[in-house]
Amino acid sequence: MELEARSEAVTASETPGGGGMTAGIIYFNTRNASIYLKAKWGLPSEVQTLSRLAVVGGGPQFRKAGNARLYEPADLDAYATAIIGPKVHSTAGLPPRKKHSTIPAGRPRCFVSKSGAR
């Protein structure tokens, strides 16, 4: 696994005062978290996907440092194992897929003007 630059991975010992983080853990920014998930788990994880999941939920746990999201490798591993399905001998053994809405709950699916035209 190859990370872009040393400045993009932060260790807790480098942060002022540690910030309540465990010393010695490496934190990946969103770009390097995506690279980590692809390299270690083979997941087709894009930066945009992780960014969207950070807003709507369903992604790996992260910490905030200013505007940056910092991911721990253990949280990325837990996320990967949670979304990877069980071993099966054929697709007939798979449970039915859940249908996910791309629109977060509580938001209208369409907007109708007062005149009734769309």
Image (cartoon, helix red, strand yellow):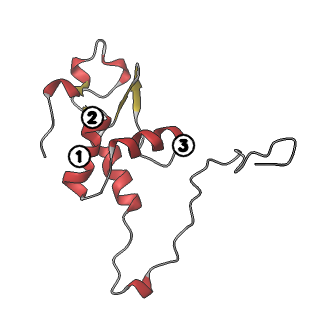
Q: Secondary structure at mark 3?
A: helix
Q: Amino acid at mark 1?
A: Tyr
Q: What residue would you read off at disc 2?
A: 28
Distance in Å between CA atoms under marks 3 and 2? 20 Å
Q: Which residue is mark 3?
A: 56
Q: Is residue 41 above or below residue 32?
A: below
* Mark nearer the N terminus (3 vs 2): 2
| Label 2 Cα crowd, 10 Å radius (few <14 / some 14-19 / many 20+) | many
Q: Using the image, determine if residue 109 lies above or below residue 73.
A: below
Task: Name the residue rendered at 79%, 46% in the picture.
Answer: 112
- Front position among marks 3 and 2: 3
| Type of amino acid under label 3 | Val
Q: Amino acid at mark 2?
A: Phe
Measured Cα–Cα span from mark 2 to mark 1: 9 Å
Look at the numbered discs 2 and 1 and tell me whether their residues touch, using CB distance below 8 Å.
yes
Mark 1, residues whose alpha carbon is within 10 Å: few (<14), some, or many (≥20)?
Answer: many
Per the model, the C-alpha gap separating discs 1 and 3 is: 21 Å
- Determine whether 110 is above or below 31 in the image: below
Which of the two discs, 1 and 3, labels the residue nearer the N terminus? Answer: 1
Disc 1 secondary structure class: helix
The label number, if any, that marks residue 36 in the structure image: 1
Is 104 positioned to the left or the right of 116 in the image?
Answer: left
Report which quarter residue 61 is drawn in.
Answer: top left
Q: Earlier in the sequence, mark 2 or mark 1?
A: 2
Q: Position of residue 15 (x, y in %)?
A: 27, 17
